Image (spheres, rainbow, N blue to C red):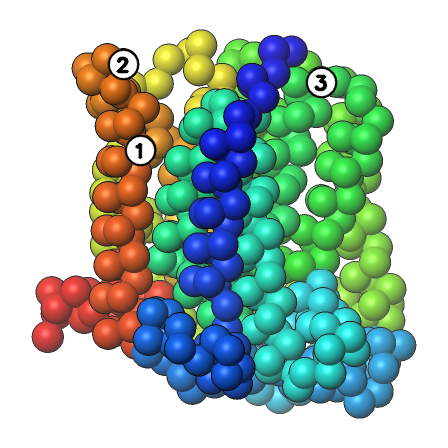
């Protein structure tokens, strides 16, 4: 396997600069209001317009508070109380099987002593920051360190990523584990039977399942890449890789069954969630639409990245294995996600933020080839302008528009298409 060339010092400098900007954009607002040393930066930080506690945030806070009050060993009781409550409620609420996010906030509370909601927001912020590091590494392995740096820059300014970091929402946290699983699958295909990669891949799949039930979408996207490998030749599939691809998710399910206190409670949790979610008035009003709804939403939230990514898709060659790998993953997950009745929300597309920005960067590099020796400078300037545009999009939707839920109607109102 040919490795990308080692990055020079200037790329390490660029990485550090982008990392600091990304951290600044993702720090919770409480940091600037509570710290005198950072108070002067408050005017520069893009404060979210929605400052209340969202419905999902309140539920996550309740789970963390229960763990703080009764201890982690009380998780089976928490799951049983959820099943009893969900049976009485006419509509669905978030299940406690989203264990990893809740437990991470519980650990944060135990270490730093912050209250439950603040702990959840710090966890969201931390994993959004970690995703930047993961993005730089993943994109660098796929296309080289110059591409990796540009993709990281676009991720730093991605509107939905900043939004998820500012609130106690699980989707940014989930995106980290989804991208970790995708990257580790790529590494295992390129370097078969390498024990450390296999172990990390299995662990990432386990943690993915422990994070959210949407792990099924990601898993099907990974399986799509494995299934098409015979024709697209991403790498080598070995029995060990197939075994880990099965054992990892199964281990996550076994742990969830244990946390729920048994198979019956575990199955009841998901059965009730599916049945009650389909009659939730808010989901019926906002979570439906044609199969191309996600395309419309992505075009509204980040139009230039979306259009550039589409341009790269139509310019794909069979020899460009990294891009094909990402496209297969996005297409495989999209095919499932667009067919979930009353279950579409732009928040779920955070797993596509990195692949779309990788494709957008490739389109930028193709468009700047005519600049000759100055093509890198031209690509860098174009990437910087795209970052500025996406930050402006964040301001429109989340600062001025004050959005919390990312449904099509809210996006259209924020853009003043609907008055």
Seen in the image, is 294 located left or right of residue 12? left
Residue nearest the viewer, comparing 88 with 43: 43
| SS label for mark 1 | helix
Seen in the image, is 150 located left or right of residue 168? left
Q: Residue at x 29, y 57 (%)?
A: 391
Q: Are marks 2 and 1 in contact (CB under 8 Å)?
A: no
Instruction: Specify the label residue 191 is tagged with.
Output: 3
Distance of label 2 from label 3 (alpha carbons): 34 Å
Distance of label 1 from label 3 (alpha carbons): 31 Å
From the top left corner, tell me how far across and down residue 83 is, in percent: 71, 79
Seen in the image, is 396 located left or right of residue 174? left
Q: Is residue 188 visible?
A: yes
| SS label for mark 2 | helix
Quadrant where the image shows the N terminus = top right
Q: Crowding at label 3, few (<14), some or many (≥20) Cα neighbours within 10 Å?
A: some
Q: Nearer the viewer, mark 2 or mark 3?
A: 2
Q: Which residue is mark 1?
A: 380
Quadrant where the image shows the C terminus = bottom left
Distance of label 2 from label 1 (alpha carbons): 13 Å
Q: Which residue is mark 2?
A: 373
Q: Residue at x 37, y 70 (%)?
A: 45
From the top left corner, tell me how far across and down residue 334 is, in percent: 43, 42
Which picture quadrant has residue 371? top left
Q: Residue at x 58, y 35 (%)?
A: 137
Residue nearest the viewer, comparing 331 with 263: 331
Mark sitting earlier along the chain (1/3): 3
Which picture quadrant has residue 229? top right
């Amino acid at each position: 396997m040919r490795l990308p060339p080692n990055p020079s010092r200037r790329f390490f400098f660029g990485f550090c600069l982008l990392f600091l900007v990304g951290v600044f954009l993702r720090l919770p607002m409480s940091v600037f209001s509570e710290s005198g040393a950072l108070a002067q930066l408050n005017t520069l930080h893009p404060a979210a317009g929605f400052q209340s506690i969202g419905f999902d945030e309140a539920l996550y806070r309740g789970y963390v508070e229960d763990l703080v009050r009764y201890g982690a060993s009380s998780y089976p009781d928490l799951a049983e109380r959820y099943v009893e409550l969900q049976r009485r409620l006419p509509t669905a609420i978030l299940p406690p099987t989203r264990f990893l996010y809740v437990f991470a906030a519980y650990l944060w509370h135990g270490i730093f002593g912050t209250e439950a909601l603040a702990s959840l927001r710090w966890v969201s912020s931390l994993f959004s920051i970690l995703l930047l590091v993961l993005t730089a590494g993943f994109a660098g392995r796929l296309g080289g360190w110059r591409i990796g740096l540009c993709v990281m820059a676009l991720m730093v300014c991605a509107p939905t990523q900043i939004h998820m970091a500012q609130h106690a929402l699980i989707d940014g946290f989930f995106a980290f584990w989804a991208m970790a699983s995708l990257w580790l699958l790529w590494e295992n295909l390129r370097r078969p039977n390498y024990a450390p990669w296999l172990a990390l891949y299995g662990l990432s799949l386990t943690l993915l399942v422990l994070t959210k039930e949407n792990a099924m979408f990601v898993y099907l996207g990974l399986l799509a890449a494995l299934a098409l490998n015979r024709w697209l030749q991403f790498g080598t599939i070995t029995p060990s890789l197939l075994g880990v691809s099965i054992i990892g998710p199964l281990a996550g399910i076994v742990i969830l069954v244990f946390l729920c206190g048994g198979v019956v409670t575990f199955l009841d949790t998901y059965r009730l969630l599916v049945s009650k979610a389909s009659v939730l008035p808010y989901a019926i009003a906002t979570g439906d639409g044609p199969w191309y709804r996600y395309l419309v939403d992505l075009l509204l939230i980040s139009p230039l990245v979306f259009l550039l990514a589409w341009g790269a898709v139509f310019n794909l060659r069979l020899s460009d294995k990294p891009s094909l790998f990402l496209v297969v993953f996005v297409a495989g997950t999209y095919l499932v996600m667009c067919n979930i009745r009353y279950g579409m929300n732009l928040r779920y597309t955070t797993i596509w933020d990195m692949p779309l920005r990788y494709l957008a960067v490739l389109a930028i590099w193709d468009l700047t080839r005519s600049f000759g020796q100055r093509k890198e400078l031209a690509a860098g300037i174009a990437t910087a302008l795209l970052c500025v545009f996406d930050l402006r999009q964040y301001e429109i939707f989340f600062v001025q528009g004050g959005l919390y839920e990312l449904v099509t109607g809210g996006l259209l109102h924020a853009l003043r298409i609907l008055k």
